[in-house]
Image: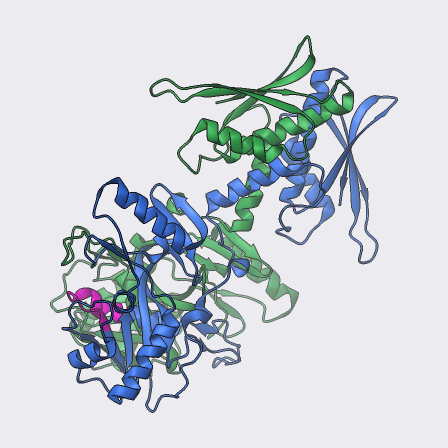
Chain colours: A blue, B green
Amino acid sequence: MRLEVLPVEGIGDVRPGDDLAAAITAAAPWLRAGDVLVVTSKIVSKAEGSLVDVPIDGDERVVARDEVLRAETARPVARRGQTRIVQTHHGFVMASAGIDASNVDRAHLVLLPKDPDASARALRTTLRERHGLDVAVVISDTMGRPWRNGLTDVALGAAGIPAIRDHRGEVDPYGNELSITQMAVVDELAAAGELVKGKCAQVPVAVVRGYLDPPLPEADGDGAAVLVRGADQDLFSLGTAEARAEGLRAAARLSDHGQPPFPALDELNLEKALTRALATITPGSTATFAADLLPGDGDRMGRCRVVCRPADSTGAALVSLGADVQRLRAALAAEGLGSMMETTEDGHGPHVVVTVR
Amino acid sequence: MRLEVLPVEGIGDVRPGDDLAAAITAAAPWLRAGDVLVVTSKIVSKAEGSLVDVPIDGDERVVARDEVLRAETARPVARRGQTRIVQTHHGFVMASAGIDASNVDRAHLVLLPKDPDASARALRTTLRERHGLDVAVVISDTMGRPWRNGLTDVALGAAGIPAIRDHRGEVDPYGNELSITQMAVVDELAAAGELVKGKCAQVPVAVVRGYLDPPLPEADGDGAAVLVRGADQDLFSLGTAEARAEGLRAAARLSDHGQPPFPALDELNLEKALTRALATITPGSTATFAADLLPGDGDRMGRCRVVCRPADSTGAALVSLGADVQRLRAALAAEGLGSMMETTEDGHGPHVVVTVR
């Protein structure tokens, strides 16, 4: 197997209503069955009219841009300075929701295509039905990623090619089952296309030849949507600073209700968790804490209560006890443990019982 | 410009001490000046002896594997179930520190090369000096990434090619400065290489031809190390669950010291921040809070104090006041505001003054 990656030059400026299939086949009469077309999302957006009018400068431009960003945002993810990382309505996590002010006149912003998989399918259908071409289509855009500098192109949409190459169940020559099972090949095709698009001026389409063997299946497949991982499945659904602030706010909301705000990170070991929580709050506290651990039986997790007594019976010591108890509950919540507090009184005076559950 | 991506077949099994340059040139006598060799890190590790002995099964294997992971980890990043995402000593953020048990016998684990840029430079030098080949080298490995399903290949090391193609200062045909400035081209080359390596059995090297024009510069360049983004620069340096727990623990540690545990997310507006903090804690509180805002003058940010009074003067109400004050301080910390608390007394009885700073 050998691949060729070829630029499609001479497509020129694309305007709303333009026929992309006609523009691509005119510029690349050499296209043939089995080719994968890697099409920059921007020309798809332009052809589909996914543009918004904005003032060409001044504060009005900034305000308009902010409004467009808000409309394109399904969920804010992280921010720092002017950078806004958001999840779009498609599910993509991108800086500025993929809104782009380059390669367009100052009076417009280019949005992402409304449904990039549908765009890929429509282009593929037109190429087949009107131009007799049996090809696959990948709609690409440029994204950053955590942990690594520099951007790469990835796939927003796909038709005629599975987004993922699945090695599950394959075995290596040593008899080990392969641990790397699912390769996002449409992202790799987008990256390969960018290598030729980015080095030439004004090349919005590249062709990868040799990856697929014609005839291609008629079905378009599931598209690039399968690459989108939902926030509930993602270990990095929020920026670190945003998630820390969420933790602090959760501590601020810990009042009467007894549920932990977030699930435990580790398998719960009540005794270890309690020890860690007490170690966290002991510095800076004058109260005393006596933990009473009732081991669990069978399926039932152990329970415990912590009797928290003030340094003395002055008003200041009681207020301080309340603050320390609240700190203990935050530390328990960090372990995934819910708690309740109850103020009571005995021969030694007022004190608090924290029940962990 | 057109690229070819070609597999190097027939390299066979690689063992510690093997001469990779000799193995590659024997398998690919067709290599020529300007080629970019994309070399799977695993064969580099094997040739360099970056392997560790492990028991072939049982609990001992699990324990040994955990120990190896610990040794390869510079910083834990996120975990869920059996998944461990860590930052390696190189700075890469990868599942299981890139340790691999596939394509190796059961008695060994393959670690990442100790210094992949140095490995790339050494291989390039040998190819030039002993085989007369003027090529660039990329050492690749497979990584996952947040927000998207499926894995892609990226570059761990590079020599003879800049890791990043920099468009800064370039202008589009409309006169806009390009917003996408730095492309991680060695990652895109690694991805292009994977397309041919992954579809063939046992192909650890691919060649990208046509991307560079010979003669190549003699200098090896900065390597792939420039792609590593430090945790301090990264918006996603910790998993969401880990960062939330950090926020809860920070709330638990808020005792006498007055510094906020984390910087503010937004430009600070004291009045808005205070209003949000009070709104967060009011549900579930029986205390009363009277805020007193002293506006800032010039460069100096405004200051404020909040007088917090208990529902009544019973011990239970004082304990509850302490808890509520601690919740207020956590809510203020979520806004990036430090605070101090002081218990005092006046004609109305004991109360707390929270000073924000």
What residue is at 43 percent from the left and 80 percent from the top? A221
Q: Is residue A8 visible?
A: yes
Does the segment drawn in magenta span residue A6?
Answer: no
Which quadrant of the figure has residue A132? bottom left
Residue sitting nearer the eye, B182 or B320 = B320
Can you say whether B285 is above or below B178 in the image? above
Place of residue B76 in the rendered image (x, y in percent of width and height, measured from the top left): 51, 51
Residue sitting nearer the eye, B47 or A250 = A250
Which part of the image, by quadrant, shows the N terminus of chain B? bottom left
Q: Is residue B18 visible?
A: no
What residue is at 25 percent from the left and 57 percent from the top? B164
Can you say whether B46 is above or below A261 in the image? below
Horizontal side of residue B216 vs B336, given as left or right: left
Does the segment drawn in magenta span residue A199?
Answer: yes
Numbered-mark total: 0
Which quadrant of the figure has residue B315? top right
The magenta segment: A193-205
